Image (tube, helix red, strand yellow):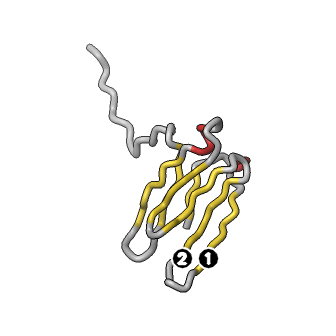
């Protein structure tokens, strides 16, 4: 399952997966717009892309669930997460 915070125009991804004899699955998620890549390699994730497109290539991989499946969310590194609730404002007297 993949969650993307990118606008629809930037959400064109191509996913390639290979299973090797050792039993490890290597996959790559390629962003066609930014030429950025998110890939798995020996149990870890790494990214690469063109440095002049920071808003498209600086990604944070946020794990959501690692118990039975590896589910993650990709978000822009500069994006501030939205709070789940807003504190109530009290009027000044």
- Nearer to me, 29 or 64: 29
Q: Residue at x 51, y 56 (%)?
A: 46
Check residue 2 in the rendering and tell me which mark sits there, or answer none: none
Judge by depth and name the residue closer to the eye, 38 or 68. 38
* Quadrant holding the C terminus: top left
From this view, report whether residue 52 is shown above or below residue 43. Answer: above
Q: Secondary structure at mark 2?
A: strand
Q: Position of residue 27 (x, y in %)?
A: 59, 69
Earlier-in-chain disc, 2 versus 1: 1
CB of mark 2 within 8 Å of CB of mark 1? yes
Q: Secondary structure at mark 1?
A: strand
Question: Which residue is tagged 2?
Answer: 25
Task: State how far apart marks 2 and 1 are (Cα).
Answer: 6 Å
Picture quadrant where residue 17 is located: bottom right
Q: Is residue 15 left or right of residue 87?
A: right
The residue at 64%/35% (across/down) is 52
Q: Say which quadrant the N terminus sits in.
A: bottom right
| Residue at the left extreme of this rendering | 93
- For mark 2, does the 10 Å Cα neighbourhood hold few (<14), some (14 to 19), or many (20 or more) residues? some
Callout 1: 10 Å neighbours few (<14), some, many (20+)? few
Q: Is residue 29 above or below residue 52?
A: below
Residue 29, by quadrant, is bottom right
**Residue at (56%, 72%) from the top-left corner?**
26
Given residues 73 and 82, the one toward you in this image is 73
Which residue was labeled with disc 1? 18
What residue occupies the far front of the structure in this picture? 21
State the image coordinates of residue 64 (x, y, percent, origin top left).
42, 61
Q: Residue at x 53, y 48 (%)?
A: 59
For this rendering, which residue is in front, 42 or 16? Answer: 42
Q: Is residue 72 left or right of residue 93?
A: right
Q: Is residue 67 left or right of residue 48?
A: left
What x and y, as percent, mark residue 6?
A: 62, 48
């Amino acid at each position: 399952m993949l969650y993307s915070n990118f606008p629809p125009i930037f959400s064109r991804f191509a996913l390639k997966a290979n299973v090797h004899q050792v039993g490890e699955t290597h996959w790559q998620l390629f962003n066609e717009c930014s030429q950025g890549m998110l890939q798995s390699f020996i149990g870890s994730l790494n990214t690469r892309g063109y440095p002049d497109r920071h808003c498209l290539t600086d990604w944070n991989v946020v794990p959501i669930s690692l118990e039975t499946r590896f589910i993650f969310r990709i978000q822009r590194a500069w994006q501030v997460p939205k709070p789940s609730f807003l504190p109530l404002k009290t009027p000044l007297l």
